[in-house]
Structure formats: structure tokens, C-alpha cells
Image: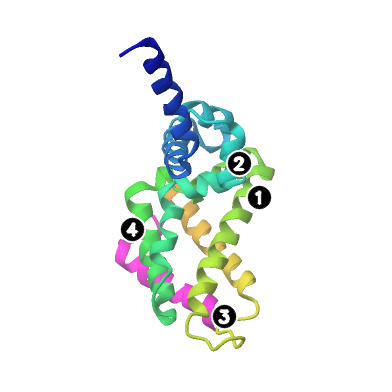
Amino acid sequence: MSEREGAAEATDAPRRRRRDPEGHRADILRAARETFAERGYARTTLREIARRAGVTHGLITRHFASKERLFLAAVPGNRDLEQVAPGPPDTLPDRIARAFVRRMETGAVDDPLVALVRSAASDQGTAAELLSAMQERSVDAYRAVLTADASPGSGEAPDDLDERVALVGAQLIGITVGRYIARTEPLASMPPERLVAHLARTLRHILFD
């Protein structure tokens, strides 16, 4: 291969990358997962993620808008929301409870709720931004389920859905602290299936009663 051909191939590669938004998105998510796992939420910066992904800081904000939204897109807990939420509205509390307990039992250390609680201890502003992003995403997902079978304009979702989702979040944060961080009894030793049953009953009351 001539020097000219080699130079052309070298310039074509970055050009192809610039025109590959899905490839960039995948690179950013991979770099974000690695960096959040190594440094934790509070110490991770978008510039470090951009460096590892081989993209610009601006490209990250174009795809994800903020560090909070990137975190929610990258970590397993919130990626599960799109798979957990869809389904019959009346069993939504059961799906939330089962997915939450399963996720926390196998990987609580990397869960966004744990990151939220730890951030609150050192940086209330960061914790508030992360909580706001989590609630906004949850409201959108739950509203889509609760209005799926409604006639146009009728809306099965309650008028105070935002408040109810905030209460769901508070319930999950409380269990996160009691069982997975402070490990207080009787939550700490409760069998997972019993926890799922109690939690599902509480969430059903919050969402529907």
C-alpha cells in the first residue's frame, strides 16, 4: 500500500466514526460503565468518559444531555426499566418489586439507588439532580403502561402520578438503605420472596389506591 493510500484509509476511519452515531453511543456507554464502576458516581467526570470513549465532551452531552442521564442509561438498574415496565397495568407493582429485589440481591453495589444514597451524604445537589432524573424517567415509563389501554384523552394514569412515583422511589430508597447499606433487621435477613411480596403490596397501594 502506498503512503497516499495509507493516508486516505487513515482519514476515512475517523470520517466513518463521525458518521456512526450508534457506534459512538455504544463507545460512550461502555466507557461510562467502566468509569462509574472504577471511580463511583461522584468522582466520575464526563471529560474522563469522553477520553476513554475517544469522543468529545460535547458529543456526550448531545447524546445524553447530562452526567445524570448518562449514568441512568449506563448502569444496569435503570436500563432494566424499559424491560420491566411494559405489561398489564394491574401487575406493574409486582414487576417493579420483583425486578428491584432481583437486581439488588445480585448487584447492589452498582445500583443507581445506592449511588444516590451515597451522593446524598456528601453532595446534596448532585443527589437531587440524580433523583430528579430517575423520577422523570420512571414517570414516563409508568405513564406509558398505565395509559396503554385508555381511550384517547381519558387517561388511566392518576392525576397525581408524579407524586405517586416519588413515593415509590422513596419506598425503594428506604429498603435500599435498610437492607443493602445499613443492613438493619428484620429487613437484612428477610427472604427475598417475602420482601418481594411485601414490597409489591405496598407499591400497589401507592400506585392504585
Q: Of helix, strand and loop, which one carries label 4?
A: helix
**Amino acid found under the numbered disc labelled 3:** Ala
Q: Is residue 158 magenta?
A: no
The residue carrying mark 4 is 102
| Point 52% across, 82% down: residue | 208
Q: Earlier in the sequence, mark 2 or mark 1?
A: 2
* Image location of residue 188, percent across then percent down: 38, 54
Dot 3 corresponds to which residue? 157
Residue 123 percent location from the top left of the image: 65, 39
Pointer 2: what residue?
61
Q: Which of the 4 image quarters holds residue 119?
A: top right
Disc 1 to disc 3: CB gap under 8 Å:
no
Q: Nearer the viewer, mark 2 or mark 1?
A: 2
Identify which residue, 97 or 81, lies in the foreground: 81
Residue 188: within the magenta? yes
10 Å crowding of disc 4: few (<14), some (14-19), many (20+): some
Q: Is residue 181 above or below residue 10?
A: below
Q: Which residue is mark 1?
A: 128
Q: Position of residue 2 (x, y in %)?
A: 34, 11
Q: Earlier in the sequence, mark 3 or mark 2?
A: 2
Marks 3 and 4 sit apart, C-alpha to C-alpha, by: 26 Å
How many neighbours does mark 3 have within 10 angstroms: few (below 14), some (14-19), or many (20 or more)?
Answer: some
